[in-house]
Amino acid sequence: MSSVTGRRPLRRAAITAAAALTLVGAGVAAIGTADAATATTTYYVATTGSDSAAGTLAAPFATIQKAISLVAAGGTIAVRGGTYPLTANIQITTSGTAAAPITLTRYGSEKVVIDGEALAYTPGAVGSTIPSAQRGAIHMEASYWKIVGLEIAHGPYGIYCNKCTGNTFDQLITHDNYETGFQLQGVSANNLILNLDSYNNRDPRKNGESADGLGVKEGSGTGNVVRGARLWNNIDDGFDAWSFSSPITLQDSISYGNGYNRWSVPDFSGDGNGFKLGGSSGTGPAASHAVTNSMAFGNAAHGFTDNGNTGAITVGRSTAYQNAKTGFDFDGGSTAKLTGNLAVGNTTAVALGSSTASGNSWNIGGTWTLLSTSPATITGARTSTGAIASSTFLVPANGAAVGARI
């Protein structure tokens, strides 16, 4: 399965000192017009700056943490292009408000890379536990932030957000971290994760059983939405909702190539599911997650699985293709409802248990041919709005309203 490399942040309007309006993709405003009156301060950060400077465009700070220590509700931190190697992880503990969120964004279209390679636990010793405060190149326990267009690599987790509410994470790239690329957990509600790319994350510390592309796990909170994510070549799962007890909405996302030991990690124990929709070490929480218009292909295990979640999961108009186990695996205790899905080329198409299915490819029967089996377009450059580029990949040649369209 092909790997996507060389991601570049997408073009967007430059942030000015007035900061009246900055687009953050898909109609989400970094500083909306309703917030303009309260967005009185923009701090700038640059690799050539100094933390004793004024934090202006002409005299920027050197570190993101310095700007975070000063920014208030309605304010903005604009980071100039370059690589920012960390000696301590970035801590976000001050919240904005619903009416005046705080924005942390790249400056214009400049590429910003936050590199956590020098932090502790990169990687940790086998069997070790990462102290909570050290989890994440960006460690966040705050609400009402908009974080836009940053690339986070080589950290002990990329972004780790605990007890977070009302945040928007837009067009982030989390890759080659030593745990999950992006993890949201604890009591966390109403967060939007939009157009995330998360890949090549691995965890030698736990022999590959933990590092996912995206985890919304070990917590609760309604209103969390994942849209337009691409999760690939992670050592464990693409998406993992382990022990999260509230419904999560997943839309227009793809997960592929997960669960393979590309790093020769000893005693390998990665799972390799595309979308793991719950579960726990005991009886899984009954969380009614909803998946629409998403694809799982080329994963080492299942495409979509309830993993012991006993809830009324819904999966609609989604596609499982050439996964090594079951395309749609919902015999783990859930009462899922599967509608209009497509399963082609998996070892097993579906396992239902107590779940129900209608209007899916296996219900309709026959031979399913596809317009394209090349993922080059959807795994290539994103559009100018940050969306996954459209193609005929895995679209049924007979025109049936079955499976995802991305």
Image (spheres, grey):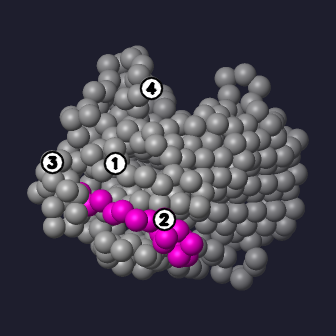
Q: Position of residue 177 (x, y in %)?
A: 35, 41
Task: Examine the structure image and report whether residue 269 is included in the region drawn in magenta.
Answer: no
Q: Position of residue 253 (x, y in %)?
A: 57, 62
Q: Residue at x 68, y 28 (%)?
A: 280
Residue on which the image places disc 4: 132
Give the spatial CA distance, label 2 vs label 4.
Answer: 33 Å
The answer to which image quadrant residue 382 occupies is: bottom left
Secondary element at image label 4:
helix
Give the spatial CA distance, label 1 vs label 2.
Answer: 15 Å
Residue on which the image places disc 1: 70
Q: Residue at x 63, y 74 (%)?
A: 405
Image quarter in which the C terminus is found = bottom right
Q: Which residues are magenta?
A: 26-45
Residue on which the image places disc 3: 52
Whether residues under marks 3 and 2 lie with C-beta atoms below 8 angstroms apart, the answer is: no
Q: Nearer the viewer, residue 75 or 157?
A: 75
